[in-house]
């Protein structure tokens, strides 16, 4: 007995074949314009492919997002920053030495080819080590790397002296977060301690979830590395619409959904267009997004079938009622 998923897959394949056959007939009449095709389906094809359309629900971002915090050891940040700085200095020094030997060799004054080749080897090695140290630092401390030089030095100084702590806040069950919260509150023995969200971390922790780096200035005495504390993230107030996760697709240009276009007079086929959306926050089993309205007809089931009909390379556009 064929299970439900296999049955739906066969129906979707039938819809694709039917659409392709219709496209061939149109090509015989006239050459298609050089632009992404807009999927269009008859009522029968829509039912076969399991296309479901609905209006999204207007909603606002939740006031708090609960997370788990871990106070980080600042010596790890300082050590990796030192390694990066030392590698950068070594790379600049080797590059300067290579430039000096090249000048001497070109002028025929006291530089052998062997010395020049050795300097080239050292410079290539130093560059590789500098790039490796920079990549490692960006991976572990991306939000810190994104700061300006002066802001980064202030953060390092405050962390080294203990005037501030760095906390990693993890959101279990989530691997992405559209809208970055600006502030956080740490629950330290019932005291609400404010923190500043620096950005998202690229490296996952043991809980395998999205993590945010938070700076806490003048933390309560005794709070130190290794402490695990509850954290409440406070996103900025944003209004949007709520869509199920199956409605949202993602490509190299960002997130988008399929919107059903208004049927033209005499047209017996439904047409769909991809529309770019901004991911605000995951909410329940869906996403709070911005970019479409609550009176739009959005494909909430079967969006993958429309993607296969349109093909790779089609570009989503901004929402337009026309």
Image: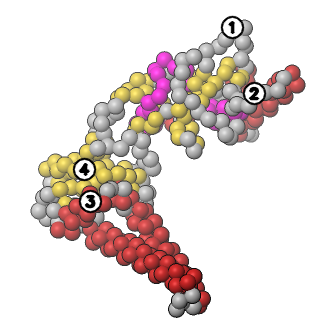
Colour scheme of the rendered structure: secondary structure
Q: CA distance from mark 1 to mark 2?
A: 22 Å
Provide the secondary structure element on which disc 4 rests. strand
Sequence order check, earlier mark of 1 and 3: 3
Q: First in sequence: mark 4 or mark 2?
A: 2
Direction from residue 86 to residue 161 in the image, left or right: left
Report the Cα–Cα distance between label 4 and label 2.
51 Å
Q: 272 and 320: which one is in front?
A: 320
Which of discs 3 and 2 lies nearer the camera? The answer is: 3
Q: Which mark is residue 265?
A: 1
Residue that numbered label 3 is attached to: 150
> Which quadrant does the C terminus fall into?
top right
Please tell me how many numbered marks the rendered image carries.
4
Mark 1 vs mark 2: give the one in front.
2
Q: Where does residue 305 sit, x and y in percent of width and height?
A: 67, 34
Asked if residue 15 lies left or right of residue 210, the reply is right
Q: Position of residue 292 (x, y in %)?
A: 48, 25
Query: Is 138 above or below relative to 83?
Result: above
Question: Distance from label 1 to label 3 (Cα)?
Answer: 62 Å
Give the Cα distance between marks 3 and 2.
53 Å
Q: Which residue is mark 2?
A: 33
**Residue bearing mark 4:** 196
Residue 21 placed where, x, y %?
83, 28
Residue 285 drawn in magenta: yes
> Considering the image in quadrants, where does the N terminus appear?
top right
- Report if the CB atoms under discs 4 and 3 are less than 8 Å apart: no
- Residue 15 visible in image: no
Q: Are marks 4 and 1 in contact (CB under 8 Å)?
A: no
């Amino acid at each position: 007995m064929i299970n439900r998923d296999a049955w739906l897959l066969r129906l979707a394949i039938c819809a694709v074949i039917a659409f392709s056959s219709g496209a061939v007939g149109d090509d015989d009449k006239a050459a298609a314009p050089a632009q992404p095709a807009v999927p269009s389906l008859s009522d029968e094809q829509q039912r076969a492919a399991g296309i479901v359309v609905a209006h999204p629900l207007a909603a606002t971002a939740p006031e708090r997002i609960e997370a788990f915090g871990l106070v980080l050891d600042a010596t790890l940040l300082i050590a990796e920053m030192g390694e990066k700085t030392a590698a950068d200095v070594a790379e600049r020094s080797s590059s300067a030495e290579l430039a000096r030997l090249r000048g001497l060799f070109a002028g025929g004054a006291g530089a052998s080819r062997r010395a020049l080749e050795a300097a080239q080897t050292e410079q290539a090695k130093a560059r590789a080590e500098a790039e490796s140290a920079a990549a490692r630092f960006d991976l572990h401390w991306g939000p810190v790397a994104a700061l300006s030089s002066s802001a980064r030095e202030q953060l390092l100084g405050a962390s080294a002296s203990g005037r501030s702590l760095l906390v990693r806040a993890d959101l279990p069950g989530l691997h992405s977060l559209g809208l970055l919260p600006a502030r956080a509150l740490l629950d330290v023995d019932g005291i609400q301690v404010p923190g500043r969200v620096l950005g998202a971390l690229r490296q996952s922790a043991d809980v395998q979830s999205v993590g945010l780096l938070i700076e806490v200035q003048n933390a309560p005495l005794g709070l130190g590395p290794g402490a695990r504390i509850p954290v409440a993230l406070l996103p900025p107030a944003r209004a949007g619409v709520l869509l199920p996760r199956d409605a949202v697709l993602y490509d190299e240009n960002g997130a988008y959904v399929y919107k059903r276009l208004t049927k033209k007079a005499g047209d017996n086929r439904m047409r769909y267009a991809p529309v770019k959306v901004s991911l605000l926050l995951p909410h329940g089993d869906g996403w709070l997004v911005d970019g479409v309205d609550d009176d739009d007809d959005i494909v909430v089931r079967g969006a993958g079938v429309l993607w296969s009909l349109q093909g790779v390379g089609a570009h989503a556009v901004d929402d337009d009622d026309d």
